[in-house]
Image (cartoon, coloured by chain):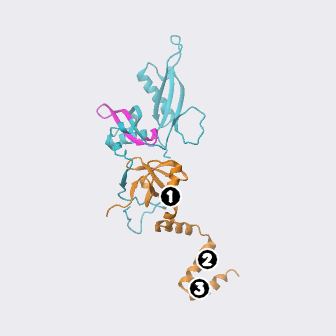
Chain colours: A orange, B cyan
């Protein structure tokens, strides 16, 4: 199987370990076989090991080591944010985050919603059953 | 930012003034060591080999550390700084090291963003490739080399503005050490 995602200048990657976990960053230059210079609109340009990066399908059109302004403009032009949020990988991460941030009431609502979808006949009896705890 | 084990120090010292020599010459050295105490010790080691002065009849005048400066920090003290820690540079390091059979000189090239990082790379590479421990290495000279003058193929192969290569296999690991488990439910998928 040939490779589809290459380390190249302009490749967007997701940080999968460490302090910047979960951020989308752009590979701005390659230091050596194991490290890249990496930049994002909201962070200082740093070096990062490739082991901490998961390459995505998105690339943007930049020259080697662009200025911050050029980088942000290129990211807008390539519409990285929307492409990421509409991709299946990006959507899965958003759902994961949402599920992790539920509070107890949200989980209760989720439980009832699931029962309603899968077993409508049970839903009303379950609702009355759960609400009886409040009375 | 990577925390480097090796720090660069600028150490200044001279012999103690005596009746024969009212104003002895002041010597300055740039060294790499893990801490200040070791830097001072290294300074006297080298000065002893070059001049007739020891720590017992000498005095330390100043010791300053070289730091990485990020753009927005205001610095008032006089310290040595890495001017541009976000720019990749090719560092050439000349060193003298002791192997099991004698002393040798060596020239090595490294690509890194900071000089301290390159020096640390050098120490680890000497330890792995030649089994030389760090106290058997003396750094003669370090310099930033422009791309045209680099000698080693392994640094020259990264001098490509359209560099492109695939990552051959994926490192599968949990996002933090706390989530590590001994057993996994399924085999990992190593394709990037």
Q: Residue furthest top?
A: B20
Mark 3 to mark 2: distance in Å?
12 Å
Mark 2, secondary structure of its residue: helix
Q: Which residue is mark 1?
A: A77
Q: Which residues are magenta?
A: B93-117
Q: Identify the residue at the far front of this view.
A: A77
Estimate the x, y position of residue A31 in percent, counting from the top left.
Answer: 41, 46
Which secondary structure, mark 3? Answer: helix
The quadrant where residue A125 appears: bottom right
Q: Of callouts 3 and 2, which one flags the residue occurring earlier in the amino acid sequence? A: 2
Above or below, comparing residue A64 to residue B27 in the picture = below
Label 1 in the same subunit as label 2: yes
Can residue B179 be seen at all in this image of the molecule? yes
Q: Secondary structure at mark 1?
A: helix
Do discs 3 and 1 share a chain?
yes
Residue under the point 38% across and 41% down:
B110
The answer for which chain carries disc 3 is: A
> For the point 39% across and 68% down, which residue is it?
B186
Q: Position of residue A52 (x, y in %)?
A: 45, 55
- Provide the residue designation for mark 3: A123
Q: Report the Cα–Cα distance between label 1 and label 2.
A: 40 Å
The residue where tag 2 is placed is: A109
- Is B89 rendered above or below residue A106? above
Q: Gap in Å between the C-alphas at discs 3 and 1? A: 48 Å
User: How many C-alpha atoms fall within 10 Å of the one at disc 2: few (<14), some, or many (≥20)?
Assistant: few
Q: Earlier in the sequence, mark 1 or mark 2?
A: 1
Which chain letter goes with mark 2? A
Does B101 appear above or below A131?
Answer: above
């Amino acid at each position: 199987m040939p490779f589809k995602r290459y380390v190249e200048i302009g490749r967007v990657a997701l940080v999968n370990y460490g302090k910047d976990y979960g951020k989308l960053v752009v590979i701005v230059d390659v230091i050596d076989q194991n490290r890249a210079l990496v930049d994002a609109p909201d962070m200082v340009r740093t070096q990062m090991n490739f082991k901490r990066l998961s390459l995505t399908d998105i690339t943007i059109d930049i020259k080697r080591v662009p200025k911050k302004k050029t980088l942000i403009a290129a990211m807008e032009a390539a519409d990285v944010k929307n492409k990421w949020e509409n991709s299946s990988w990006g959507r899965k991460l958003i759902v994961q985050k949402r599920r992790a941030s539920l509070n107890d009431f949200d989980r209760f609502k989720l439980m009832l919603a699931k029962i309603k979808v899968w077993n409508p006949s049970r839903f009303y009896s379950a609702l009355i059953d759960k609400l009886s705890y409040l009375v | 930012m990577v925390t480097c084990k090796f720090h660069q120090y600028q150490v200044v010292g001279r012999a103690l003034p005596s009746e024969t020599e009212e104003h002895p010459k002041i010597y300055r050295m740039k060294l790499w060591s893990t801490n200040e105490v070791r830097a001072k010790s290294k300074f006297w080691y080298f000065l002893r080999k070059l001049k007739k002065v020891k720590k017992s009849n000498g005095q330390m005048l100043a010791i300053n550390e070289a730091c990485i400066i990020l753009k927005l920090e205001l610095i008032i003290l006089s310290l040595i700084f890495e001017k541009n820690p976000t720019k990749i540079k090719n560092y050439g390091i000349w060193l003298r090291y002791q192997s099991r059979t004698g002393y040798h000189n060596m020239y090595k090239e490294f690509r890194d963003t900071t000089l301290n990082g390159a020096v640390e790379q050098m120490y680890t590479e000497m330890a792995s490739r030649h089994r030389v421990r760090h106290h058997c290495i003396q750094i003669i000279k370090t310099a930033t080399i422009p791309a045209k003058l680099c000698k080693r193929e392994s640094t020259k192969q990264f001098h490509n503005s359209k560099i492109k290569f695939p990552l051959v296999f994926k490192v599968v690991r949990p996002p933090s050490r706390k989530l590590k488990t001994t057993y996994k439910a399924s085999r990992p998928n190593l394709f990037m």
